[in-house]
Image (tube, rainbow, N blue to C red):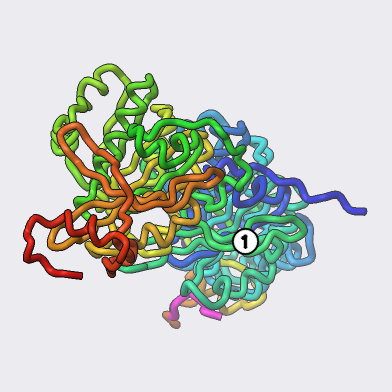
Amino acid sequence: MNRYVLKLYVTGQTARSQRAIEQLKAICESELNQHYEMVVIDVLERPQLAEDERILATPTVVKELPPPIRRIIGDLSDIERVLLGLDLLTHTRVGGHDPA
Amino acid sequence: MTLAIEKMRSEIPGFDHVAHGGLPRGRTTLISGTAGSAKTVFAAQFLSAGIDLADEHGVFVTFEEAPGDLRQNMLGLGWDIRKWESEGRWAFVDASPQPGEPPVLTGGYDLGALLARIEHAIHRIGATRIVLDSVGGMLAQLPDTATVRHELFRIALALKGMGVTSLITAERLGEDGPIARFGVEEFVADNVIILRNHLEQESRRRTVEILKFRGTDHQKGECPFTIIPGEGIVVIPLSAIELKQRSSDRRVTSGNNDLDAMCGGGFFRDSIILVSGPTGTGKTLITTGFIAGGADRGERCLLLAFEESREQLVRNASGWGIDYERMEAEGKLKVVCAYPEAASLEDHLIWIKKLIDEHRPDRVAVDSLSALERVASLKSFREFAIGLTSFIKHREIPGLFTATTSTLLGGSSITETHISTTTDSIILLRYVEMYGEMRRGLAVLKMRGSHHDKEIREFTIDGRGMHIGQAFRNIFGILSGNFTRVSPGELERLDELFRDDDGPGI
């Protein structure tokens, strides 16, 4: 299985940050079975990292590996879309952009 | 009692005058305009002028153009952003669209990362000015308009909390209607500036209007502006010089003793003189006399010509015994010829002002002002004429303008109609038809603050110039062009005018 490198950018210790962290952990555990590395970055502490990665929104997950690089915005509550963003839902090729 | 809102000088030329001192300090101002209305230039100049003229550092948050493009584009306006970045005086927060797949939305989010980056950049370089360009670019990148609007409001509040003065640009769909798309004025409603780019009679006319500054004052209405390569935006305030000039009672010569006498002893030193008449009546001659009269008394003169080439002007003047080239060699005169069509009126105004500032003349002549009528709309022309006359008046030097009337007999010109109230003196030149012969008549129509000769006098032109003679006593309606020659008491004199004994009896 491909090794996953996921970076999660959050703003401070808010309820939304906590929810995103727990949600991503749960998804990784169930779907990626140890083949992953997850880094949580608080943009209040490391703004330069957010600048370098040009992050606008929090929470944002950046899937750095495997390629292609993908970005997932939001608190990860819509699990199906998270899987889609991580390229784990290969059977439905739907565009990633939600026009809502 | 609350403290009055302080203004921060934007240092954008002319704007601070219109804004009564500048932008509200520590507040957010919305700059709204259609595509191509120079919002980004205005915003970037707010930062560059701050760096250049006020030693204030700035952060540019870009949602549309990539920093690389901005650096390159602004170089053409003379702003070396890369240098300022290396000196820690300018910082970009790059929020421009990234290549690749658009992000997947999986739930609620905020713009905490953007705000953290902005705060980081502000603290890193000690910025006091910040620009967000533009709201539309931000909305295009992120789903859920309601969230983005709410977050922008939060960012605006945070910026206020940091005490920085900020500009946010937003798109408009048309020159009329809502202030901006997406209802952005709802969250940055305190201060709104609108930039416009009108198409008027086939020429572009840019204007800036301060719609509101909450809690503080500013000029109302639109002001034209132009963008000069190597300099940027220059706003042209219409009421730049309020009518507060001291009136001088010092007189200067018109260059013609008879005309001086008719004006009660010459022109006032700080006056605007309009010489109006149909083609060929002698306007250029009066201009030439005005220049020579000044140069003879050791004054520095500036002649702006919009109708004739340099060679023609020099030849005309030498025909009356006046040597422009020698005067120029002696530094007493500068002759500048320009095609009216070569630039917009706003640009003409700016180079003329610059020229006057550099050359520092003691008198200025413009021959002719009416040649500029045709290159712009009436409104632009009026603004130009007012802008130029008030600028010259402010320098406390006399300015002589000529205007060509459209008809040979009587009539008036657009120039006359629109600048007559801002002029101090008006001299009318008219053809007078007398029994099949064209004569020339001159009248001093207006001479502010002085008595003057009220008669319409005949004048002749020869190789030595202009000679003003007697008044036309036997003819009425010269100004209107509808002559009436009946004057019983003058019959005998009239008869003498005609050698032909069979001439018409009156």
- The answer to whether residue B138 is magenta is no
Residue B68 visible within the image: no
Q: Residue at x 24, y 46 (%)?
A: B282
Residue B116 drawn above or below residue A4: above
Q: Position of residue B427 (x, y in %)?
A: 38, 49
Residue A63 visible within the image: yes
For residue B372, side relative to residue B111 (left or right): left
Q: Which residues are magenta?
A: A94-100
Farthest residue toward the bottom?
A: A92
Q: Position of residue B162 (x, y in %)?
A: 75, 47
Q: Position of residue B252 (x, y in %)?
A: 45, 31
Q: Is most of the magenta stretch helix, strand or loop? A: loop
Q: Residue at x 18, y 27 (%)?
A: B321
Q: Position of residue A96 (x, y in %)?
A: 48, 74
Mark 1, residue position: B220
Q: Number of callouts in the render? A: 1
Q: Secondary structure at mark 1?
A: loop
For residue B148, side relative to residue B308 (left or right): right
**Chain under numbered label 1:** B
Q: Quadrant of the C terminus of chain B?
A: bottom left
Q: Residue at x 49, y 56 (%)?
A: B421
Residue B67 drawn above or below residue A25: above
| Front in this rendered view, residue A83 or B370 | B370
Q: Quadrant of the N terminus of chain B?
A: bottom right
Q: Residue at x 53, y 43 (%)?
A: B450
Please, what is the three-letter code of the amino acid marked with disc 1? Lys
| Front in this rendered view, residue B67 or B490 | B490
Farthest residue toward the right?
A: B1
For residue B5, side relative to residue B129 (left or right): right
